[in-house]
Amino acid sequence: MRVIVFGATGMVGQGVLRECLLAPDVTEVLVVTRSPIRVQHPKLRELRVTDFADLSPVKSELTGYDACFYCLGASAVGLDEAAYTRVSYEFPVAAARLLATLSPEMTFIYVSGAGTGAGSRQMWARVKARTEDEVFTLFHNGYAFRPGFIQPMHGARSKTGWYNAIYTVTAPLMPLFSRLAPGQVTSTDAVGRAMLRAVRTGFPRRVVTTAEMR
């Protein structure tokens, strides 16, 4: 299969990219990015863009793919609703709309978050709910992945510094957390493998929970 990954420099994206490169049935991985990813692999191709809200200049480079794993996102901390909406709604919807015209049968996976909902009091949850709805409308093979706590594996690191501090402190406790709340904890590699499973066999529901990603 041929796969597109957005957000490969983020923590989740790093894990997803690693699993794609390891998978024998993945023949090509196209990373759409603004900055270099500093990963080299025979299956990997890098596509640099300047504006995630307008991918029309690179439209010809995005044809013929079987799946898109949209891992690009940002923490809502310090962002107002307009800024957060641009990153978490406008960017992924721009990609989804273009790819739906190029490859309507592709599997499109949007990394959302546990607690997402249109009626939530949390701004981020409402914004992500709108994005999920767009993905479901555009792709009959569209999924929203809603992970809870994600343990970074194999050197994956968040772009948010204080997130890394939290992961460092909690790392020794992860086996305990996994036993006490298995439905709330997953890992970057498990998320990547679950995305590939969605392409190969699908999931029974379009919203994929943490427990289903394990």
Image (cartoon, grey):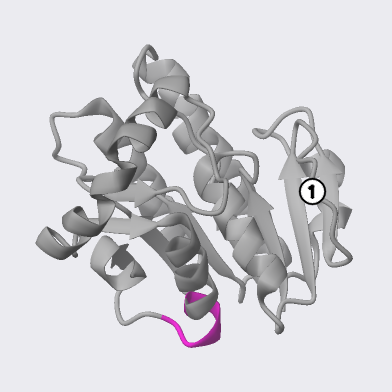
Q: Which residue is mark 1?
A: 39
The answer to whether one can see residue 28 in this image is yes
* Residue toward you, 71 or 138: 71
> Which residue is depicted at the point 46% across and 18% down?
83
Q: Residues within 10 Å of mark 1 (few under 14, many from 20)?
A: few
Q: In the picture, which quadrant includes the N terminus?
A: bottom right
Q: Position of residue 61 (x, y in %)?
A: 86, 55
State the extent of the magenta-drawn residues as a range. 198-202
Residue extending furthest toward the front: 172
- Residue 121 is left or right of residue 70, and the answer is left
> At x 25% / y 27%, what residue is drawn?
123
Q: Three-letter amino acid code at disc 1?
A: Val
Q: Is residue 29 above or below residue 84?
A: below
Position of residue 47 measured from the top left corner of the image (x, y, whole percent)? 83, 45
Q: Is residue 206 visible?
A: no
Which residue is drawn at the image coordinates 64% and 39% (left, top)?
9
Q: Closest to the observer: 115 or 214?
A: 214
